[in-house]
Image (cartoon, rainbow, N blue to C red):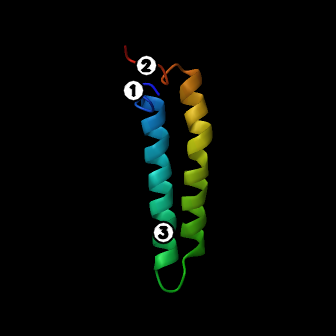
Amino acid sequence: MADDHGNTPAAWTAVLVSLVGFTIGAVGMSVTPLNWPLFWVGTVIAVAALPLFFVLVKMGLHESSH
C-alpha cells in the first residue's frame, strides 16, 4: 500500500461531507419525537459524498502530491 493512501483532497472532502451527513442524520434520529426530514437530509448529504468524490477525482484532486 502506498504511504499516502487516501491522503488527497478528494478523499478528505468526501469523508468530511459524509461525516457531516451522518452527524445530521444522527441528530434527526436522536431528538424526541424523531425528526424524519432532518434524518433524510443527512442521508442525502452522506450519499452525495460519493458522486462528489468522483467529480473531484475527474478534476485531478486525487493524485499524489509527490
Q: Are marks 1 and 2 in contact (CB under 8 Å)?
A: yes
Label 2, label 3: how many angstroms apart (C-alpha)?
33 Å
Residue denoted by label 1: 4
Dot 3 amino acid type: Ala
Is 20 rendered above or below residue 56? below
Say whether disc 1 or disc 2 marks the residue closer to the N-terminus.
Answer: 1
Dot 2 amino acid type: Ser
Q: Residue at point 50% right, 41% down?
A: 14
Residue denoted by label 2: 64
Residue in the foreground of this view, choosing between 37 and 29: 29
Say whether disc 2 or disc 3 marks the residue closer to the N-terminus.
Answer: 3
Q: Is residue 36 left or right of residue 17?
A: right
Displayed quadrant of residue 56: top right
> Counting other residues with Cα less than 10 Å from the Cα at mark 3, is it few (<14), some (14-19), or many (20 or more)?
some
Label 1, label 2: how many angstroms apart (C-alpha)?
7 Å
Q: Position of residue 62 (x, y in %)?
A: 49, 24
Residue in the foreground of this view, choosing between 32 and 62: 62
Q: Residue at point 42% right, 37% down?
A: 12
| Marks 1, 2: nearer the viewer | 1
For the C terminus, the quadrant is: top left
Q: Position of residue 4 (x, y in %)?
A: 39, 26
Can you tell which mark lies on residue 26? 3
Q: Residue at point 50% right, 50% down?
A: 18
Q: Are marks 2 and 3 in contact (CB under 8 Å)?
A: no
Tag 2, which secondary structure?
A: loop
Say whether disc 1 or disc 3 marks the residue closer to the N-terminus.
Answer: 1
Residue sticking out furthest to the front = 1
> Counting other residues with Cα less than 10 Å from the Cα at mark 1, is it few (<14), some (14-19), or many (20 or more)?
few
